[in-house]
Amino acid sequence: MHVAGTGGGAGPDLAELLKEVARGDQDAFAAVYDQVAGPVLGLVRSVLRDPAQSEEVTQEVLVEVWRTAAHFQPDKGSAMSWVMTFAHRRAVDRVRSAQAATDREQRAALLDQTPAFDEVTEAVEARLEREQVRRCMRTLTELQRQSVTLAYYRGLTYREVAELLAQPLGTVKTRLRDGLIRLRDCLGVTA
């Protein structure tokens, strides 16, 4: 392995090491690992806070460095900046992934807490002719039908409906209002 120094005996130059890694040199990768593992772990831990996840993401970053070393372009920036950019992106991706999972779990929990559709529709449809209500519900758009069902049949607040459908609150309010007007007109109810 041919490795150039940075001068002053500071050790091999990271950019040169990455060139060797791109050629498949495992010894060069070990030297890259020694130079960047600590700073990468520090950056990842500052984003994630969780030690176990930080170690996992650090390993993912180092594997990525091994796989993509040939893509490093010294004229675009320093080797350390290139590696740290991987680290930051991977850490942020992990945070976003965890947040998306939490959001899905909260929506699922909210659905589990709402009463079953059939329990509530029995009382409503007993007062109104069952077929007419169903026919009128079919005239609504999908978002109107979902909003009306969740708000009036399941008893959710407008905000809960908006969160569950991942729609802005204003959009849900408008769809509910428009849906209720359509239902009133279809059912022939006078205001």
Image: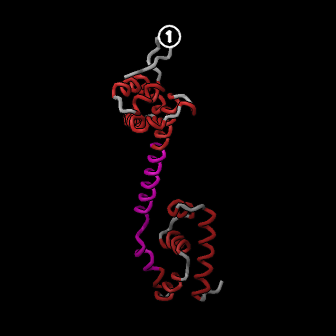
Location of residue 75 in the rendering, given as x and y in whole percent from the top left corner: 57, 31
Mark 1, other Cα within 10 Å: few <14 / some 14–19 / many ≥20: few
Name the residue located 50 percent from the left edge and 29 percent from the top edge: 79
Residues 63 and 139: in front is 63
Q: Is residue 157 covered in magenta?
A: no
Q: Residue furthest top?
A: 8
**Looking at the image, can residue 58 be seen?**
no
Horizontal side of residue 1 vs 40, given as left or right:
left
Residues 130 and 4: in front is 4
Residues 130 and 145: in front is 145
Please, is residue 113 above or below residue 69 in the view? below
Q: Which quadrant is the N terminus positioned in?
A: top left
Q: Which residues are the magenta region?
A: 94-123
**Looking at the image, can residue 182 be seen?**
yes
What residue is pinned by disc 1?
A: 8
Location of residue 66 in the rendering, given as x and y in whole percent from the top left corner: 39, 35
Please, is residue 74 above or below residue 169 in the view? above
Q: Give the residue type at disc 1.
A: Gly
Location of residue 158 in the rendering, given as x and y in whole percent from the top left corner: 57, 64
Q: Is residue 119 covered in magenta?
A: yes
